[in-house]
Amino acid sequence: MSESTWYVAVGGQQQGPISREDIIAGIRGGRYGRDTHVYGPGMPNWLPIQSDGEFAAAFGGPAAAPPPPPIGRGRAHEIDFELFGEDMQYLEITLDPGEACVAEAGAFMYMDPGIQMETVFGDGSGQDAGSGFMGKLLSAGKRVITGESLFMTVFGNAAGTRQKVAFASPYPGKIVPVDLKQHGGQVLCEKDAFLCAAKGISVGIAFNRKLGAGLFGGEGFILQKLEGDGLAFLHSGGTILSRQLAPGETLRVDTGCIVAFETTVTYDIQMVKGVKSIIFGGEGLFYATLTGPGRIWLQSLPFSRLAKKVIAAVPRPTGGGSVGEGSVLGGLGGLIMGGDR
């Protein structure tokens, strides 16, 4: 990005590229207010316009303080990991004494004897530690909204030496490690994508503010929001695509293929154009649009698509008996082998 290239977000609409001088002129001319956000050289994310000293001076006031760190930032345990396999992967995490990680129910594969398991309300991040039972219940309730369990499992190293614990994907695909501190401390993901994370990562919810994305996005109004400064692990179907979108760059995506994206990415839904495409396209009525800046992760084989193919291929018996699919004798083979009587 050139030093003179900037982008401005006003009322949810992105403008640019423009120069720093044009932004300053826009501030003085009243086109840009104090609620405007900018993205420019050296910035990891969109920031309030007053966070830049020159822009703040154009308003006639001091620069605004930098935005507060996300919830959970600076508290996540530092864990080591290794991925095994290609298409049906599992993840092995090595914990130092006193370290821990959290995982969804059903993800556990194996662990060393020094690892202790504890089932907790919510995500186990400790963000509700000072709010008592009601705070923990509220944290767990957020997970129920996304269709997940009230509980998560914490795996802690209670031994005096390094210990290992492993987790596996629930279906064929890839496990994606995401270091949240490299993505502004926050990442949004589909509600079934989260596998496990270092303890201290907060697993919450995010609402789709746009009506189209909420009604037709395939995931309802709710996405999972991962916050913190440590490692989180997502699972996807098929092959994973990781892509960095430039400011204003838009990619049209099948709604089921979205795994996760940074919070700087704008997510919306558009309707397929053309009567023939709608009736004969076989791709549904809607697709998602992801607009940068920010990183996105896509999967080549959503589990819903795989499940539909499996269901369509299941033999449908007539009269309560088996079809005998795959046998050169067909129905006669069933009679010979004693299947249908």
Image (tube, grey):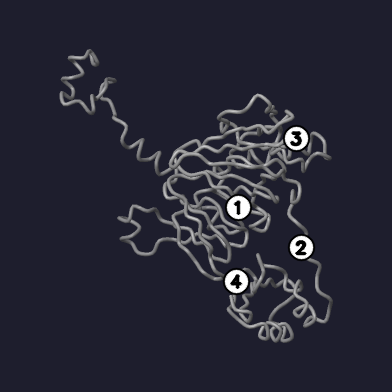
CB under 8 Å between callouts 2 and 3? no
Type of amino acid at the residue the image marks with label 3: Gly
Q: List the single residue furthest toward the front.
A: 161
For disc 3, the marked residue is 98
Helix, strand or loop at mark 3: loop
**Label drawn at residue 188:** 1
Q: CA distance from mark 2 to mark 1?
A: 19 Å
- Residue 333: x %, y % from top left: 18, 19
The quarter holding residue 28 reads bottom right
Q: Is residue 10 visible?
A: no
Q: CA distance from mark 3 to mark 1?
A: 29 Å
Helix, strand or loop at mark 4: strand
Which residue lies at the image location 48% right of the left edge and 53% below the top edge?
Answer: 298
Lower sequence index among marks 2 and 4: 4
Is disc 3 surrounded by few (<14), some (14 to 19) or many (20+) residues within 10 Å?
A: some
Is disc 1 surrounded by few (<14), some (14 to 19) or many (20+) residues within 10 Å?
A: many
Type of amino acid at the residue the image marks with label 1: Leu
For disc 2, the marked residue is 67
For disc 4, the marked residue is 13
Is disc 4 surrounded by few (<14), some (14 to 19) or many (20+) residues within 10 Å?
A: few
